[in-house]
Each structure stands twice: as C-alpha cells, then as structure tokens.
Image (cartoon, rainbow, N blue to C red):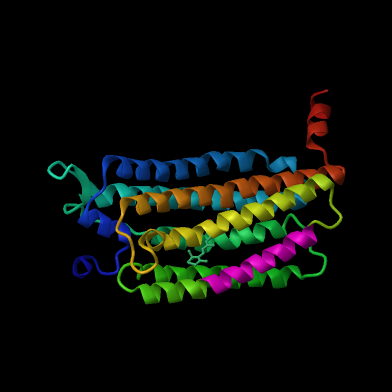
Amino acid sequence: LIAQLGNATFENYVGLESGYSEMAYQLSAHVLTLGYAVMLAALLYFVLTIKTVKRKFRISSVLSVVVMVSAFLLLYVQQQNWISAFQYDTEAGMYMLSSTNPGDLFNNGYRYLNWLIDVPMLLFQILFVVTLTTSSFTSVRNQFWFSGTGMILTGYVGQYYEVTDPTLFFVWGTISTVFFFHILYLMKQVIDQGKEGIPAKAQQYLGTIWTLFLITWMLYPGAYLMPYLFGGFTEPALSEVAVVGRHMTYTVADVGSKVIYGIYLTLVAQEISKAEGYDWEQMEEGATA
Ligand code: RET
C-alpha cells in the first residue's frame, strides 16, 4: 500500500484497503457539511450583533467575521474533497478510493492552511476585548503570532508522515506541541489580567472562555493523533472508525474554538459596554419611544 499511496493521509489507505461502509462514508460527508453550514449561520450572528457592543470592542466581531468566511470556504472545499476522493463500488458494496477521479487524494492540509489565518485571528481577537494590566499588547500579539504559525507549520509537515514514518510524525508533532504550550501559557495570562476590574458577570464569562479554549484547542492534537489512538501508538490503525472520529473531532473543535468562543467574547464585550454606560437594549427602546 505504501508503494501506491506514499505520504497520503490514512483516510486514503482505508479507502484503498477496506473501503468505507455506507454509514462511515455518509456520516463523514454529513459532519463535514454541518461544519461549513454552522460557519455561515454564525457569520450572520457576528454581523447582526456588532452594534450591541461599544465601538472599541467591534474589531472582535470583525475578526469573527473574517474567521467565519475563511472557515466556511475551507470547510466547503474539505467536504468536496471527501466526496470526490471516494466512489461507491457496487461489487464491494463499499466506498473505495476513486480510480476515475482525476483530482486529489483526500488531504487534511486545507484545514492546516486555514488555521494559518484563523489561529492568529482568534488569538488577537481576545486582545480587543480585555485590557492587559501588566503585559504589553504588542509583545503578546507578536508572541501569539509567532507560536501560532510555528505550531501549525510544524504540524502541517508532520501530518504527511502519519502512515509512512511514525518517528517523523511524532517528532514534528512534539515540536508543534512546544509552541502550543506557549500559546496556552500566554492565553492564561491574558485571561487572568482581563478579569481585573470588570463586572462579575463578565469575569464569569472569561472563566468559561478559558475552559472552552483549553478543551477545544486540545481536540486538534487529538485529531492529529487519531490513527495512533486507535492503533496503540505503534502503528496507525487503518480503521474507518478512526476516520469518522477524526472528522467529528475536527468539527466539534471548529464550532467550539471559533463560533462559541466568538459568542462568549461578544457576551463579555456586552457586559463591559453596559457597565461603561453603553446599553444597547435601552437605546433601542429610546429610539422607538
Ligand atoms: C497540531 C499538530 C500536533 C500537535 C499540536 C497541534 C495543534 C493544533 C491546534 C490547532 C488549533 C486550531 C484552531 C483552529 C481554528 O480555526 C498542529 C494538530 C499541538 C491547537 C483553533
């Protein structure tokens, strides 16, 4: 198989070796579709709520809009990539790697390059909502950018080796994880400083954002490791369950780290706006009275 597929990801190996059952193939296609549909719906939320926060917080909503548009396009392409890479084989009764498809093999690389835009945007976004007390905005922003792109580029290289060279796969994955820990450290500082001097409700929301951040961002390395989580860490499992598991993990992670995170940041900004005398609900009533 390696002679035929080389550095292709394990989704293709499963498609060539055993193929996908109806449920595994369709579930994957549907989960990928759900992913881009949510991004388009949430795009409307971020546009429609922009005036509910004070002007100084609106860049956060704009960054959510940027993330939604880029994620929508990428996840759409990712779904098209899935349905064109595999084809129903009536003899086998399974979806096999397509022999007639002149296009791509399946690859998660679209995601990684999309993260190159989204990860820095998501990290910058919170800096427009919180006020840093001891760190400098420019310094944190540059470190977020440096470690965000470092984490993704090293992971992108590593994912090519998930079947052909487990050692390289784990070495690149480990380098990527060093950058990831640096991001977690910075984010904890940003959130702790941001909690100072804001309304209790907004502090609570920031606490939720930290938990959400920790859980959803950890799902990405989980998805990277998926073939090894099922294969006992020695060799990748060529199993359709692991493939479906990876699609689901990515989709849950994407909705949490981009959409729910953006909504919570809007809630924080609404609370602080209100405390600073900008009450959009009152203003609306005033306007219609
Ligand atoms: C990789 C490689 C393996 C090690 C680690 C990784 C971390 C990825 C993360 C991605 C986050 C992406 C987000 C995208 C939103 O649009 C690259 C999988 C640690 C944390 C939040």
> On the rendered structure, is 248 left or right of 209?
left
> On the rendered structure, is 199 left or right of 84?
right
Residue 130: x and y in percent read 76, 57
Residue 284: image quadrant is top right
Residue 111 shown in magenta? no
Residue 288 versus residue 29: which sits nearer the camera? 29
Residue 56: x and y in percent read 76, 52
Residue at 67% in and 40% down? 49
Quadrant of the frame with the C terminus: top right
Residue at 68% in and 68% down? 186
Query: Residue furthest toward the top?
Result: 289
Residue 111: x and y in percent read 44, 58
Is 84 placed above or below 176 here?
A: above
Residue 160 makes an appearance in the image: yes
Residue at 34% in and 48% down? 80
Residue 104 makes an appearance in the image: no
> On the rendered structure, is 67 left or right of 266?
left
Quadrant of the frame with the N terminus: bottom left
Range drawn in magenta? 177-194
Q: How many marks?
A: 0
Residue 161: image quadrant is bottom left
Residue 186 shown in magenta? yes
Query: Residue furthest toward the left?
Result: 91
> On the rendered structure, is 5 left or right of 213?
left
Residue at 68% in and 63% down? 187
Residue 214: x and y in percent read 62, 58
Residue 180 versus residue 170: which sits nearer the camera? 170
Is 211 placed above or below 36 here?
A: below
- Magenta segment, principal secondary structure? helix
